[in-house]
C-alpha cells in the first residue's frame, strides 16, 4: 500500500487514480486501504467511501479472479438472461454480487451493455460471449486452476 | 444593478444568486437544496425560473442576478414542471399527509402521536410544523403524486448521541453533506452509493461518532425534512416562542435561540443572525444548554449546615447567617473568589462587595495563567503595547495562520471555522502541538513538538527568519539584543529538544514569511511553573514576521476579568495565591462564587459557596446560596475578540435561585451598605463602564497599536526530564468543559461519549506496553499530585506523551505543561 501511495502526489485530484491503482493491485479496496489513502490525501475516509461506492469499477470486498457479468437488460432479459443468472448462481454457489469462497469467481449483473442484438450477453473479464444458452460451459472454460 | 422579478422592480448589489435577491425582496421561489449559508448546488431543480432572452429554465439558486434581467418565477409552465419535479422527489418520501385533503382538520384535532418507531406521514414526524418540505409542498400546491412511491425501509440510526437519522425521510438534497464538509470541515456524512440505492452515510456505515463527527448539529439545523432530528425535542410540543441567550460554555459567546413551550426550555439552536456564530455553534451550545440549565444538580433553596447535614432554609435566614458570620472575621481572614464564567455585572458587584463589605485584600478573580494574562504581564513588565482585540473575520483573510498551544476546534470552535475559511482561500496553516489536534488534516504542516519546548521552537524559527534577512522590526527597540541572543542558539542541538528537525523548520519558516501571519496562542503554552516564557518568545517571533499575536483566554468572560484587572488600581490576587493562603491557614473563611479545586487541604472554618449546582466544593459548604444560571438573569459577556454582548433572561429562575449580583447586594444591605441598591442588572451598568473601559464603546473590536519592542528572553528550556519514575510527559488540554461546579461530561451522557473530561489519552503502543484496555480505569501520578481517569487509546498522541483534560474543579491545579507523570492501572 505504501509503495502505491508513493506513486501519487498528495493532491485530492489523485483520488480516483489511486483507487483504480489499488483496485487493480488487490482486486478490491479494503478498509485499511481507505484509511491509508485518507491519510495520504488528507481527506476524510467518508469522502473516499462516497467516491468508492459511486463507481461500479471499485469494490469493497475482494473480488474473484474472474468476473462474470450477466446482462439483465430488457432484450437479454426476454431472451432468457434470468435463467442464466440462476444457473451461474447455482454452479458457483453464490448470489449475485458475491464472490466464491476460493476467490475464483465473482458473479455480477448489469443492465444493458448496448449490444442487444447479440443477446443474451455474458461478459467474463471483459470478454463478450454472445447468444449464450448455457452457463456451465462458460464457467468450465474459466475454471482452470480452481 | 436593476432587474425585475415577476414584474417587481428590484435593485440589488454585489454578486448574488437570483434566488437570494428574490428572498431579500420577499418573493418566494420554492427551493429545497439551496440554503442561505451554503454555496449553490443545483440538485433539486425546484428553484427554476424563466429569464427573458434565455432558452429553457434556469436554477435561480446558481444563476447570478445581472443588470437588466427580467425574471419570471411563476408561469404556468414553471408551475407544471415544478409539480412534476416535486412529485419525483416525493416518491421517496412518505407523502400521504403532505397531500392529504384533511390536513387542516387533522392538524387541529390530532394529539401527540409521534411516539412511533416508523414515520410514515407528517403527523407521526417530529418535524411536523417546522418543515421546509411541508412549506415547499404548500407553495408548489401539489395535490397528488403521479409516480408510485417507495418506502425504503432503512433502519433508523439511533446509535449516536443527540440526534437520530431516519433516511427514509431523506430527499437527498445534500444540505447536510455540504454543511458538514464546506462549513464545518468535518466531512462526516456524504452521498453513498448511487441511483436508487443512494443514501447519505458514512464510510462503511460506521456511527457518526466513529466517523469524525463533532456533533455540532449543523446538519440537523439545515435538513429540510425530519430525517435528522434532535432526540431531546422529538416528543416535545412545537415551541410557542424563542428567546436569545449567549452561550457561556466558551470564550466565543455564540448567540443561541432558546425554544420555549409554556415558559419551559425545550432546547437551544444557534441563532441564524448571531454576530459571532451566524447560525453555527458547537456541540456544547447546540445540545447541552438545556441539560446545563435544568440539571438535577441545581440547588433550589439556600442551605445551612446543621448537625453535619445541609438543611434548607429561607433566603432571609441564610442571608442573616452569612452577614453575621462575615462580621466575626477580620477582613483579610476571609478569602473571596469570583469566576470568569460570571457576567460582567456579577463580577463588578462581587469585586465591590469584597472590597467594601468584606474588606479583604484576598480577592481572586481568575487563575491568571491564560496567554491573555501572560501577554498582559509582558505589557506591564516591558512596556510593550500589544493589541488584545481582534475581529474573527480577519482570521479568514489571513495568508498564514500559526496555531500553537490550542486545539482550536474544541477550545474556540468559531475561530476554527474562520481558520477553515482561510485555508479554503489558500492560506497556509501551521500547527505546533504535541498531539494531533482536531482537523489537523487541514494543516500544511504539523510540527509535533515535544511538550514544553515551544519557547525553544519559536526561537529557532526566529533565528531561521533572521538568517533569511527579510524581516520586520529591525528599527524596534530590543531588536539588536534579541538578534544577538539568538546567535548562540545551536539549531541541531535544539532539534534534539524540540523534536522538530531543520527541514521542517525551514518549511515552517518559508510559510511564515509569506506575510503577516496570525499567531493564535492557547492555554497549552502555560508552563508548569513560573512566568510564561513561551509567550515572550512568541511575541518576538510575531514582531519579526510582522504578524499578529492573538492570546486566547479560557472561559467565556475571561476578557471581562482581564480588563477589570488591567484597569485596576487595587490589585487582586491569583487564585492559586488565595488557595495557598488557605492551605497555610492565613485565610480562615472562604466565600467562593467560582469553582475551586476539591483539594482536601483546602479547609476553612467557614465555607460559603454561591453556585448553581450541588456538586464539587458546594457539597462541603457550611452555607450554600443558590445562584441562577445565565438563562435566568440578564447580563453581559466580553468574548475572546473583546466584543461586548449582552443577554437577557429567558426563563424563570429555577427554585429559589437568585442572580449572583442580587445575593451580594442583599448581603451588603444587611451589613448597612447603601451603595448596593441595585434592583435590576441594568442598574449596575454605570459602574461597569467605569471598571471595564472597553464596554464604553460597544463591540469595540478595535486594534490599537502603540509602542512595540522586542522583549529580552531569559534562559531557555532544556527539555523535560523524564526518567524511570515518571516516564511519560503530560500535555494538558484546556478546553472548557465545565460550567460553574458542573463537569459537563459527568452529568450529560451524550457528551461523555464525545469528550469525556476523564479521558487520559495514550498512544496504542504505550497502551500495549502497559497492558491497558480502552476505557479502563487508570491513575496518573506526578510529583505534585494525581488524577484518576479512564484510558482513551488514540494515535493522536505520540508515544511517550499523554494528554488529559485540565479540570480545575477536580484539584489538578498544578497540572500544567509539561509534567512528567507515570500511569498505572486502577480506579
Ligand atoms: S453534527 Fe456536524 S460534524 Fe456531525 S455530521 Fe452533522 S454537520 Fe457533520
Ligand atoms: S438528511 Fe436531510 S439534509 Fe441530508 S440530504 Fe437528507 S434531507 Fe437533505
Ligand atoms: S463555540 Fe463556545 S459559545 Fe459557541 S456554542 Fe460552542 S461553547 Fe457555546
Ligand atoms: S439488454 Fe443486454 S445488451 Fe442490451
Ligand atoms: S434550490 Fe436551486 S436547484 Fe435546489
Image: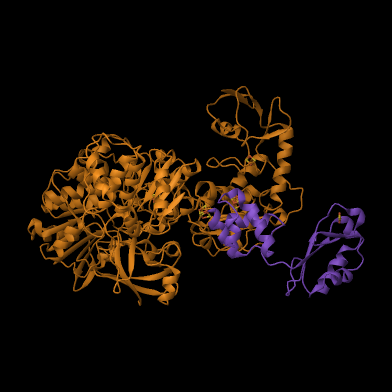
Task: Name which quarter of the figure residue B44 lies in.
Answer: top right
Q: Is the residue B73 above or below the residue B218 in the image?
A: above
Q: Is the residue B405 above or below the residue B614 in the image?
A: above
Counting from the top left corner in percent of width and height, residue A73 is at 84, 56
Q: Nearer the viewer, residue B623 or B520?
A: B520
Counting from the top left corner in percent of width and height, residue B791 is at 40, 70
Residue B615 can be seen, yes or no:
no
The quarter of the picture showing ligand 5: top right
Quarter of the image with the C terminus of chain B is bottom left
Counting from the top left corner in percent of width and height, residue B823 is at 34, 73
Q: Nearer the viewer, residue B477 or B111?
A: B477
Q: Identify by letter the chain in orange.
A: B
**What tint does the image give chain A?**
purple
Residue B146 can be seen, yes or no:
yes
Counting from the top left corner in percent of width and height, residue B315 is at 22, 58
Q: Nearer the viewer, residue B158 or B428?
A: B428
Task: Name which quarter of the figure residue B78 lies in.
Answer: top right
Decide if residue B155 is on the left or right side of residue B479: right
Task: Name which quarter of the figure residue B389 lies in.
Answer: top left
Q: Residue at x 17, y 58 (%)?
A: B577
Amino acid at each position: 500500500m505504501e509503495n502505491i501511495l508513493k506513486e501519487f502526489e498528495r493532491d485530492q485530484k489523485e483520488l480516483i487514480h489511486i483507487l483504480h491503482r489499488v483496485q487493480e493491485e488487490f482486486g478490491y479496496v479494503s478498509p485499511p486501504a481507505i484509511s491509508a489513502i485518507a491519510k495520504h490525501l488528507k481527506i476524510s475516509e467518508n469522502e473516499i467511501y462516497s467516491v468508492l461506492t459511486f463507481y461500479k469499477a471499485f469494490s469493497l470486498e475482494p473480488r474473484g479472479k474472474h468476473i462474470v457479468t450477466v446482462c439483465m437488460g430488457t432484450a437479454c432479459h426476454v431472451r432468457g438472461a434470468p435463467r442464466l443468472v440462476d444457473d451461474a448462481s447455482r454452479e458457483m454457489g453464490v448470489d449475485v454480487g458475491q464472490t466464491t469462497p476460493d476467490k475464483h469467481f465473482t458473479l455480477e449483473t448489469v443492465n444493458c451493455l448496448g449490444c442487444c442484438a447479440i443477446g443474451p450477453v455474458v461478459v467474463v473479464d471483459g470478454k463478450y460471449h454472445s447468444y449464450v444458452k448455457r452457463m456451465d460451459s462458460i464457467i468450465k472454460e474459466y475454471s482452470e486452476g480452481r | 444593478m436593476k432587474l425585475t422579478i415577476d414584474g417587481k422592480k428590484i435593485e440589488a448589489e454585489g454578486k448574488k444568486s437570483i434566488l437570494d435577491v428574490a428572498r431579500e425582496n420577499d418573493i418566494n421561489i420554492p427551493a429545497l437544496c439551496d440554503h442561505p449559508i451554503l454555496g449553490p448546488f443545483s440538485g433539486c431543480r425546484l428553484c427554476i425560473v424563466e429569464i427573458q432572452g434565455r432558452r429553457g429554465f434556469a436554477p435561480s439558486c446558481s444563476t447570478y442576478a445581472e443588470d437588466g434581467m427580467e425574471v419570471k418565477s411563476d408561469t404556468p409552465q414553471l408551475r407544471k414542471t415544478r409539480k412534476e419535479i416535486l412529485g419525483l422527489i416525493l416518491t421517496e418520501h412518505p407523502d400521504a399527509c403532505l397531500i392529504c385533503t384533511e390536513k387542516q382538520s387533522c392538524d387541529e384535532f390530532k394529539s401527540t402521536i409521534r411516539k412511533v418507531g416508523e414515520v410514515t406521514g407528517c403527523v407521526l414526524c417530529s418535524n411536523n410544523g417546522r418543515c421546509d418540505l411541508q412549506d415547499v409542498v404548500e407553495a408548489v400546491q401539489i395535490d397528488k403524486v403521479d409516480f408510485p412511491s417507495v418506502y425504503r425501509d432503512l433502519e433508523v440510526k439511533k446509535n449516536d448521541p443527540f440526534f437520530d437519522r431516519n433516511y427514509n425521510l431523506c430527499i437527498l438534497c445534500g444540505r447536510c453533506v455540504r454543511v458538514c464538509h464546506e462549513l464545518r470541515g468535518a466531512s462526516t456524512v456524504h452521498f453513498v452509493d448511487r441511483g436508487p440505492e443512494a443514501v447519505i452515510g458514512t464510510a462503511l456505515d460506521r456511527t457518526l461518532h466513529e466517523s469524525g463527527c463533532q456533533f455540532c448539529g449543523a446538519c440537523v439545523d439545515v435538513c429540510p425534512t425530519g430525517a435528522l432530528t434532535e432526540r431531546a425535542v422529538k416528543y416535545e410540543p412545537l415551541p410557542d416562542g424563542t428567546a436569545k441567550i449567549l452561550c457561556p460554555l466558551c470564550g466565543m459567546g455564540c448567540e443561541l435561540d432558546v425554544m420555549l413551550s409554556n415558559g419551559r426550555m425545550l432546547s437551544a439552536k444557534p441563532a441564524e443572525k448571531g454576530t459571532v456564530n451566524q447560525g453555527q455553534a458547537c456541540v456544547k451550545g447546540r445540545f447541552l444548554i438545556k441539560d446545563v440549565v435544568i440539571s438535577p444538580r441545581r440547588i433550589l433553596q439556600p442551605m445551612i449546615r446543621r448537625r453535619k447535614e445541609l438543611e434548607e432554609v429561607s433566603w432571609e435566614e441564610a442571608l442573616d447567617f452569612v452577614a453575621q458570620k462575615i462580621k466575626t472575621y477580620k477582613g483579610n481572614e476571609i478569602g473571596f473568589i469570583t469566576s470568569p464564567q460570571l457576567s460582567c455585572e456579577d463580577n463588578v458587584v462581587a469585586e465591590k462587595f469584597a472590597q467594601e463589605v468584606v474588606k479583604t485584600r484576598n480577592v481572586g478573580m481568575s487563575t491568571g495563567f491564560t496567554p491573555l494574562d501572560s501577554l498582559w504581564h509582558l505589557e506591564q513588565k516591558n512596556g510593550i503595547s500589544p493589541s488584545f482585540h481582534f475581529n474573527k473575520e480577519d482570521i479568514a483573510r489571513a495568508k498564514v495562520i500559526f496555531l500553537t498551544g490550542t486545539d482550536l476546534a474544541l477550545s474556540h470552535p468559531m475561530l476554527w471555522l474562520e481558520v477553515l475559511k482561510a485555508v479554503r482561500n489558500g492560506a497556509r496553516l501551521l500547527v505546533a502541538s504535541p498531539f494531533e489536534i482536531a482537523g489537523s488534516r487541514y494543516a500544511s504542516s504539523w510540527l509535533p513538538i515535544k511538550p514544553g519546548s515551544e519557547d525553544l521552537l519559536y526561537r529557532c524559527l526566529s533565528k531561521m527568519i533572521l538568517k533569511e534577512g527579510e524581516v520586520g522590526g529591525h528599527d524596534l527597540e530590543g531588536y539588536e539584543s534579541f538578534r544577538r541572543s539568538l546567535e548562540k542558539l545551536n539549531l541541531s542541538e535544539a532539534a534534539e529538544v524540540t523534536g522538530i528537525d531543520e527541514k521542517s523548520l525551514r518549511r515552517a519558516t518559508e510559510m511564515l514569511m509569506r506575510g503577516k501571519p496570525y499567531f493564535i496562542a492557547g492555554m497549552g503554552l502555560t508552563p508548569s511553573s513560573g512566568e510564561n516564557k513561551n509567550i515572550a518568545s512568541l511575541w518576538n517571533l510575531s514582531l519579526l514576521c510582522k504578524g499578529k499575536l492573538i492570546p486566547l483566554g479560557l472561559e467565556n468572560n475571561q476578557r471581562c476579568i482581564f480588563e477589570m484587572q488591567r484597569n485596576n488600581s487595587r490589585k487582586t490576587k491569583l487564585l492559586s495565591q488565595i488557595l495557598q493562603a488557605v492551605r497555610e491557614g492565613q485565610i480562615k473563611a472562604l466565600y467562593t462564587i467560582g469553582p475551586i479545586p476539591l483539594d482536601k487541604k483546602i479547609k476553612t472554618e467557614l465555607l460559603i459557596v454561591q453556585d448553581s449546582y450541588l456538586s464539587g466544593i458546594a457539597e462541603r459548604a457550611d452555607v450554600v446560596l443558590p445562584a441562577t444560571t445565565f438563562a435566568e438573569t440578564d447580563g453581559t459577556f466580553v468574548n475572546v475578540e473583546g466584543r461586548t454582548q449582552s443577554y437577557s433572561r429567558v426563563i424563570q429562575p429555577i427554585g429559589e435561585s437568585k442572580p449572583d449580583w442580587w445575593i451580594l447586594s442583599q448581603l451588603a444591605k444587611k451589613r448597612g451598605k447603601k451603595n448596593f441598591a441595585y434592583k435590576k442588572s441594568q442598574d449596575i451598568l454605570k459602574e461597569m463602564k467605569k471598571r471595564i473601559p472597553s464596554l464604553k464603546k460597544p463591540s469595540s473590536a478595535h486594534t490599537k497599536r502603540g509602542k512595540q519592542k522586542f522583549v529580552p528572553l531569559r534562559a531557555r528550556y532544556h527539555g523535560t526530564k523524564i526518567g524511570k519514575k515518571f516516564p511519560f510527559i503530560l500535555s494538558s488540554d484546556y478546553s472548557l468543559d465545565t460550567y460553574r461546579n458542573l463537569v459537563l461530561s459527568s452529568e450529560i451522557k451524550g457528551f461523555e461519549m464525545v469528550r469525556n473530561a476523564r479521558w487520559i489519552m495514550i498512544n496504542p503502543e504505550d497502551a500495549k506496553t502497559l497492558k491497558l484496555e480502552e476505557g479502563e480505569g487508570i491513575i496518573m501520578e506526578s510529583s505534585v499530585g494525581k488524577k484518576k481517569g479512564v484510558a482513551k487509546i488514540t494515535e493522536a498522541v505520540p508515544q511517550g506523551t499523554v494528554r488529559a483534560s485540565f479540570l480545575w474543579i477536580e484539584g489538578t491545579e498544578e497540572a500544567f505543561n509539561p509534567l512528567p507523570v507515570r500511569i498505572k492501572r486502577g480506579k
